[in-house]
Image: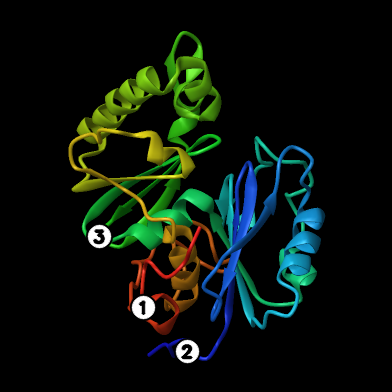
Amino acid sequence: MKRRMDRRVKILVVDVGGSHVKCVATGHRSPVKFKSGPRLTPDRMVRQVLKITKGWRFDVVSIGYPGVVRRGRIAREPHNLGSGWIGFDLQAAFGRPVKTINDAAMQALGAYEGGKMLFLGLGTGLGSALIVDGVIAAMELGHLHYADGCTYEGFLGNQGRKKLGNRKWQGKVRDVVEGFRKALLPDYIVLGGGNARHMKRLPPRARRGRNADAFLGGFRLWERQDQNAAGQSESADGPEPVSITTGEHHADPNQYRP
């Protein structure tokens, strides 16, 4: 039988986004953040994280990365950040054990309540992940062709929202979500990301994600007995069910203030 993680382990969760990097840790109720953007390299990210969390005590790190992660390794450079992420040794840079997962998958893990769930992250781009009976898979639905030579991300990401205006953008979101619902047949859909707040009327079977979902997902990575297809472990051989437990790190889903 595999031994569960010692509950005394303190976890730092780093949610890397296209506009901001947000951090929270065991015992800290208020996240801290700094701006990211196209000049953010992994080295700069680590140095800035360590700077704004100076004095925090943590033993391990969870990182949500806005791009493709395979078996715990970053597999593609991000679209909205600087370069140099592939091959960068995050564990050596932090000086602690690190688990890396796609950022949408980390949010999905925090939002998951069982069954078959589709997560769509409405932020700088369009993140996506699917969890089926506890098995999580990060996806890149945003890069699929949508219309007029544009991808889903081009329409539903932040640039698309600014171009279309909130009213038309909301209609596009509802249409796309309904199409994904019919194709993927989820039990429910979670709309996360900073732009989910602009949705005045949600599509059928959908709910908004919570601000804390990404952080809860990061804590849950270390409360699981092993890793899965989302790519957190270099030694993982394939998909494995998510083990969702109510641990000390996320007893109150609303404790983290944005």
Using the image, tell me which numbered label, if any, was put on residue 7: 2
Placement of 141 over or under 60, stated as above or below: above
Q: Which of the pair 105/252 is nearer the observer?
A: 252
Pointer 3: what residue?
Answer: 133
Q: Residue furthest top?
A: 148
Placement of 121 over or under 137, stated as above or below: above
Could you tell me if the residues under marks 1 and 2 are in contact, i.e. CB atoms within 8 Å?
no
Three-letter residue code for mark 2: Arg
Point 44% across, 27% down: residue:
156
Using the image, tell me which numbered label, if any, was put on residue 138: none
- Separation of residues labelled 1 and 2 (CA atoms): 13 Å
- Separation of residues labelled 1 and 3 (CA atoms): 22 Å
Secondary structure type for disc 2: loop
Indicate which label's residue lies in the foreground, 1 or 3: 1
Query: Which of marks 3 and 2 precedes in the sequence?
Result: 2
Looking at the image, residue 102 sits to the left or right of residue 239; the answer is right
The crowding category of the residue bearing disc 2, from other C-alpha atoms within 10 Å (few below 14, some 14 to 19, many at least 20), is few
Point 33% across, 78% down: residue:
246
Q: Which of the pair 70/62 is nearer the observer?
A: 62
Indicate which label's residue lies in the foreground, 2 or 3: 2
Point 69% across, 53% down: residue:
34
Three-letter residue code for mark 1: Ala
Could you tell me if the residues under marks 2 and 3 are in contact, i.e. CB atoms within 8 Å?
no
Using the image, tell me which numbered label, if any, was put on residue 251: 1
Tell me residue 103's x, y (percent): 52, 52
Query: Which of marks 2 and 1 precedes in the sequence?
Result: 2
| Colour scheme shown | rainbow
Tell me residue 144's x, y (percent): 45, 26
Three-letter residue code for mark 3: Asp
